[in-house]
């Protein structure tokens, strides 16, 4: 690959494209334009073969585009960093040859995303641009039909992976919140919500904006069936009157 | 208007369209499709005549679309609610006649938006749909080129309108944060950041993704020139190693 010649000094740009929460139509016009124009598309692939981000925009991809799946370990305790290094090294060759690269990122690339691992390795040497995307945080409240925040609210995004005490102490100070990364952490989070008297306010949604989106009353959720991409939304109580 | 006849029982839908942070190209494909298809467009207009949300998508609007500007008081202590009621009453007539209405919302409609005031008044009687938009929270970090959150971070969105003590106590517990609604609150917020030793981490951005976007080192910001739509971004410190 290194023997192909690029126009002098013309480096490729690495784009991190925020794809949004799952509905392909929630891609931005800018994301769509860049996705259609680049010769190289990069996306994570789980060891069992799933490519969630690719599946969101599959209908927009073109057969002449080179696809580079990143296969990264998902086992606890196993670092993904050598995998990112390997992909970054490969992308550096394409970028040095003047070819633009788009990295597919669910939601927004810099909000709990993995794009940063490539960005941090490549943006010092190559032009890099982040294309913002719709976050599942906002989309989940939108799909539930409940206004999330209001006026002077303090809003928090908390991951269910934290200890129950940490979740409880932060949540107690939030006017509105979302709890992400549920999966097997659902039972722990449910206990915290119960302790704080939040079970009536909290709403549960799975795979927001996707075709198989599910909204389930939180007391009826089967804890053994909660996917990692489920979310609990605790909307504002509208304590600021008028305005 | 009430004498025009609609197809039996066909009600119009009220859409809240999230326009994103300011770059017209950060509108979603879905938002664009709906914006182009509805006969009626509604947006806030300040008493001095500015229509910020309309200006974001001005190039997409069509001359045959009916535009309804909402003129609402912005004076402290004066309630906007009678103004929203008046607009809701007017929109109800169009919706009852089967006409779809799109309400323009900067960012995402349910994240610190005013769309809720129309939604709460109309969604019980008419079909209502919220089209998620890119939030300026994520877009600001993207434009600054700094990954915002990572792994198990607790993220907070805090408004500069709160008391210094409240901002300080919440911020002290955040792994990453944005501070919104700055304007004349900048000096107060700056003091809190100084007290918490956050001035090196905090980044300042005005009008992110807009043509007149400005990024200024936070120590060099002129406090008398800070617009309401400026934001301070405090990115994660990457305390979770590897992954």
Image: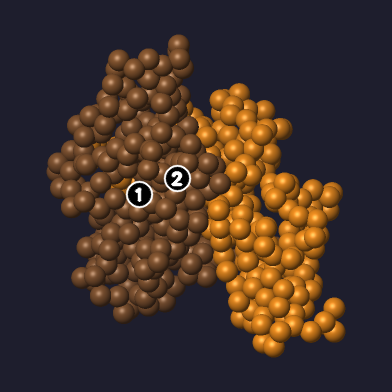
Chain colours: A brown, B orange
**Place of residue A158 in the rendered image (x, y in percent of width and height, measured from the top left):** 37, 54
Q: Which residue is mark 2?
A: A18
Of labels 1 and 2, earlier in sequence is: 2
Decide which of B165, B119 is in the foreground and name it.
B119
Please state the total of marks drawn on the protein image. Answer: 2
Q: Which residue is mark 1?
A: A54
Disc 2 secondary structure class: strand
**Place of residue B202 in the rendered image (x, y in percent of width and height, measured from the top left):** 49, 33
Decide which of A165, B58 is in the foreground and name it.
B58
Q: Residue at x 27, y 63 (%)?
A: A227
Q: Chain of mark 1?
A: A
Quarter of the figure that contains the C terminus of chain A: bottom right
Would you call the spot at circle 2 few (<14 residues within 10 Å), some (14-19), or many (20 or more)?
many
- Marks 1 & 2, CB-CB < 8 Å contact: no
Decide which of B154, A165 is in the foreground and name it.
B154
Task: Compute the Cα span from label 1 to label 2.
Answer: 12 Å
């Amino acid at each position: 690959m290194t023997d192909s010649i690029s126009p002098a000094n013309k480096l490729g740009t690495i784009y991190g494209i925020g794809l949004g929460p799952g509905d392909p139509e929630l891609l931005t016009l800018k994301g769509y334009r860049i996705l259609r124009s680049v010769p190289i598309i990069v996306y994570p692939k789980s060891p069992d073969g799933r490519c969630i981000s690719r599946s969101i925009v599959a209908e927009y991809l073109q057969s002449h585009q080179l696809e580079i799946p990143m296969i990264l370990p998902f086992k606890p305790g196993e670092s993904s960093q050598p995998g990112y290094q390997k992909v970054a090294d490969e992308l550096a060759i394409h970028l040095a040859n003047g070819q633009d690269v788009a990295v597919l990122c669910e939601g927004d690339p810099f909000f709990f995303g993995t794009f940063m691992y490539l960005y941090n390795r490549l943006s010092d040497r190559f032009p890099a641009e982040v294309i913002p995307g719709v976050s599942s945080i906002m989309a989940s409240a939108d799909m539930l039909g409940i206004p999330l925040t209001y006026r002077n609210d303090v809003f928090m995004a908390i991951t269910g992976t934290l200890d129950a005490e940490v979740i409880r102490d932060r949540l107690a100070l939030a006017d509105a919140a979302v709890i992400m990364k549920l999966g097997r952490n659902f039972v722990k989070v449910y206990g915290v919500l119960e302790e704080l008297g939040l079970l009536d306010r909290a709403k549960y949604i799975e795979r927001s904006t996707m075709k198989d989106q599910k909204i389930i009353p939180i007391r009826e959720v089967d804890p053994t069936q909660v996917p990692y991409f489920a979310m609990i939304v605790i909307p504002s109580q509208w304590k600021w009157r008028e305005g």
